[in-house]
Amino acid sequence: MFSPLAEIEAKTARVVVIGIGYVGLPLALELARAGFRCTGLDTDAEKVRQLNAGRSYIPDVAASDLAPYVSERRLDATCDPAVLGEAHVVIVCVPTPLNKTKDPDMRFIVDAADEIARHQHDGMLVILESTTYPGATSEVLVPKLTARGQMLGRTIFVAFSPERVDPGNQVYKTRNTPKVLGGATPECLRVASRLYAQIIEQLVPVSSTETAELVKLLENTFRAVNIGLVNEIAMMSRKLGVDAFEVIRAAATKPFGFLPFFPGPGLGGHCIPIDPLYLSWKLRTLHCQARFIELADSVNSGMPAYVVERTSEALNDQEKPVRGSKILIYGVAYKRNVNDCRESPAFPIIYGLEQRGARVSYMDPFVPRADLNGVARDSVALDADFGLFDAVVVVTDHDALDRARLARQARLVVDTRDALHDITRDRAKIYGL
Ligand SMILES: NC(=O)c1ccc[n+]([C@@H]2O[C@H](COP(=O)([O-])OP(=O)(O)OC[C@H]3O[C@@H](n4cnc5c(N)ncnc54)[C@H](O)[C@@H]3O)[C@@H](O)[C@H]2O)c1
């Protein structure tokens, strides 16, 4: 048996993290901190340049944390896949988006697997962390890594361990978030567990890679479905003349059996809008329908259009047409206090309002410049007078939003996050979902 166990235990194992984005960079830092020599392999030359200069491009990773390991040469980055030839451990953290028909786009995992296979040698541990459908590790990764007669659990070790990073979370980071992992064989699990035990406080081993893959999809489906439920409750509440946020906050006082989720302008980010569709796609290949997932997707992906409609109604109440109105979108990042705009509902909302003839600008302290439906635009100044706009739509409730100033200056607010609920009693110009 050629196992990397001895090198892992001695921390002499050379680790390569493929994909040093939101997931890969914090992980690479944690490995370097634990004493491993860790190299990030990425196709993005700019990220490689930044990391090698000791600079961080991910808000959750402070440059002051990175820099000492970079100068000690314990952490570096490269675009050259040849580094894989020196690796005892390879961890794959590449994107797993959807294609235009909302089916899994596996090309990044396939490319990474092909690259590993080209530089493969006996005794490698390969772990997939990218979120994917149940069966992907055994159907996509394992065949490529055993194609030339390598023996699973003897000369090549393969595991799946989903990443649970929550960007912006000040309490739970890589080290103190329990980590689920499943091995392609019991020996694969044993070797992968020894690696993670060096950097993670609590491990949660499960019986197979498929189980670990489904754990991640359950976690994110749970969120997508619950958000779909409260988004529908928000629309029902409006018909009933009731404030959905007040209902949810009151329900959340129940000390057992209820978990609060809050409605909003639509899902965003790389996970919740996408991951459940990996599961429903897999189920379709087995002639089954994932009904909750499809229903939640339909409700959640309808929210941006609903916000456009609410904004039009609110302007109408003030005897203003949408066409020609000046509208400010507050927040284009997909969630509070981050700069990540992937899948942000702000973009379809802006598109929908512009389709109706509105003149739309945005303000976001985390996103000074954004590609708005194909055109690069700058955030308006953060101290701009909210009263210059016919309406302000709060899409993302960053902590930096001066809520009192917004309530005072704005002529009309469409508050999709209930950001102003404890700021003003004057609700006449404030519209909820
Ligand atoms: N961002 C999150 O909050 C989060 C949380 C949990 C899980 N995930 C999952 O983790 C995975 C990675 O997500 P992310 O947010 O870190 O993505 P990201 O886009 O921030 O980073 C991925 C990196 O991989 C690089 N890359 C792509 N193909 C490559 C290749 N063949 N070789 C080398 N580098 C390559 C890209 O250039 C990019 O830098 C996804 O599957 C995602 O669903 C993300």
Image: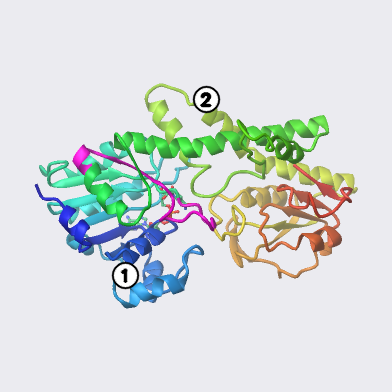
Q: Position of residue 401 (x, y in %)?
A: 71, 61
Is 297 located above or below residue 419 in the figure?
Answer: above
Can the viewer see residue 88? no
Q: Earlier in the sequence, mark 1 or mark 2?
A: 1
Report whether 223 appears left or right of 251. Answer: left
Give the residue pinned by disc 1: 76
In front: 167, or 253?
253
Q: Secondary structure at mark 1?
A: strand
* Alpha carbons under labels 1 and 2: distance apart: 45 Å
Q: Is residue 187 magenta?
A: yes
Q: Is residue 223 magenta?
A: no
Residue positioned 68% across, 63% down in the render:
400
Which residue is tagged 2?
Answer: 291
| Magenta part of the chain | 165-188
Q: Position of residue 201 (x, y in %)?
A: 38, 52
Name the amino acid type tagged 2.
Answer: Arg
- Residue located at (67% from left, 36% from top): 231
The residue lying at 59 percent from left, 44 percent from top is 267
